[in-house]
Image: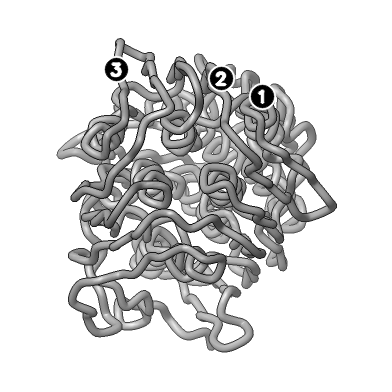
Amino acid sequence: MLKKFGVSSIRLGHSPMDKFVVRGGNPLLGTVRISGAKNAALPAMAAALLTDEPVILENIPQVRDIETERKLLSAIGAEVELGYGRAQHRTTICCRDLVNPEASYELVKTMRASTLVLGPLVARMGDARVSLPGGCAIGARPINLHLKGLEKLGAKITQEHGYVHASAKRLKGARVVFERITVTGTEDLLMAATLAEGETILENCAREPEVVDLAALLNKMGAQIEGAGSHMIRIRGVDKLHGARHRIIPDRVEAGTFVVAGALTGGDLTVANCDPRHLDALLQKLEECGVKVRTNGESVRVVGNGALKSADMVTEEYPGFPTDMQAQYMALATQADGSSVITENIFENRFMHALELVRMGANVKIEGSRAVVRGRTSLSGAAVQASDLRASASLVLAALVADGETIIDRVYHIDRGYEHIEEKLRGVGAQIRRIGELLPRRVATPAVAS
């Protein structure tokens, strides 16, 4: 019998009131190892709902969003075995007896990826009730594309009291063309279609590595999926899926964050246990900025050797420059000679970190979806506040090159997606420490948008 997951199993040990104290000036030297991808692990955990057999996932990062997902699966009726010791990054999920096909507001409001259970629950149980996500710190990310797709597959969709209710005796294959590219929408429909009757064709799909990784897991479970990683995915529905073992891909955003950190601090940093192919757009941009980058199998070595050069950047869907690296690139741009224009095409309102960088001495002007960053400016330590996951990472990067001491508040945001980032940074020479009251092992997850 697997150990059922509950709140008592949370092991992060960090308080929502924690802060980072960073003293800048040290180049990052040495090697840092990258954890598993949070954005690949979350849909993979949701995929376990599609079978009554155990699904074993390896290389799971120890971050707060994973704990939230585990709480959600437990509430639905899943049994979760947590790895300890050498197996601490492995999770076994068994959804043999699902009792409550619902994702409550209390969980969805803390992590919008919770809506990924919608497709699997309708496909497996014929019924799902999921809270609408509501607002988001980096702009609206509605699930209407998920709902339209499920309706195409034959689900009946109703909305009341802030919840979406989806039901279907059995989903039926169909052709679904997404109005715009959506990662979670692609993943949700991909999972739902595996148990649909007949063939489903998804068009205008997201091409992210996390989508490819999910398809690989589903195929190991017995699904018949072709084309993941392209704009069109074909799924032949099956009657039943079985258990599987799968290793989650490395986190390309964590890897990119450390690559930028090495370049920004003028260090010599090897970012190990990553997939350089997933970082192509970022690495090309850094080379344009004058950074020496070398890739070797599963690692990237970045050498900051001299003045950084400014370069404009535009966020795009994969394989373009990722929106999740925009804030970190802005921190880099503050130290580049000349002006850089950063255009954010994916999310509105994703420049909230800019005002905090200005508090540290950055010269940033926001013009709608564009930010004009004039470097090279001297940054100085200040008290700043994180507004979302990637914004918090940009403030840490800026603090690494700022004069004096920077205090970063609301670092629970960074705990959602970066595993022990302060420990990894200290291991390569950064002066960073966590302060605040350390709570007992059972820690409530704060209500934040993803």
Rounded to the nearest whole Å, what is the CA distance between mark 2 and mark 3? Answer: 16 Å
Rounded to the nearest whole Å, what is the CA distance between mark 3 and mark 1? Answer: 22 Å
**The one of 223 and 27 positioned closer to us in this rendering:** 27
Does 75 sit above or below residue 256? below
- In which quadrant is the C terminus drawn? top left
Q: Is residue 420 left or right of residue 360?
A: right
Task: Name the kind of residue labelled 3 in the image.
Answer: Lys
Q: Residue drawn 38% across and 63% down?
A: 64
Number of marks:
3
Classify mark 3: residues with Cα within 10 Å, few (<14), some (14-19) or many (20+).
Answer: some
Does 124 sit above or below residue 244? above
- At mark 2, the secondary structure is loop
Does 195 sit above or below residue 347? below
Residue labelled with disc 3? 365
Residue with the most extreme top position: 367
Q: Answer with the quarter of the image where residue 388 lies.
A: top left
Q: Residue drawn 51% across and 17% down?
A: 180
Tag 3 or tag 2, which sits nearer the N-term? 2
Q: Is residue 99 left or right of residue 256?
A: left
| Label 2 with label 1: CB-CB less than 8 Å | yes
Residue labelled with disc 1? 288
Task: Name the kind of residue labelled 2 in the image.
Answer: Ala
Q: Residue drawn 21% across and 64% down?
A: 16
Mark identifier at residue 311: 2
Percent coordinates x, y for residue 8 in the rendering: 31, 83
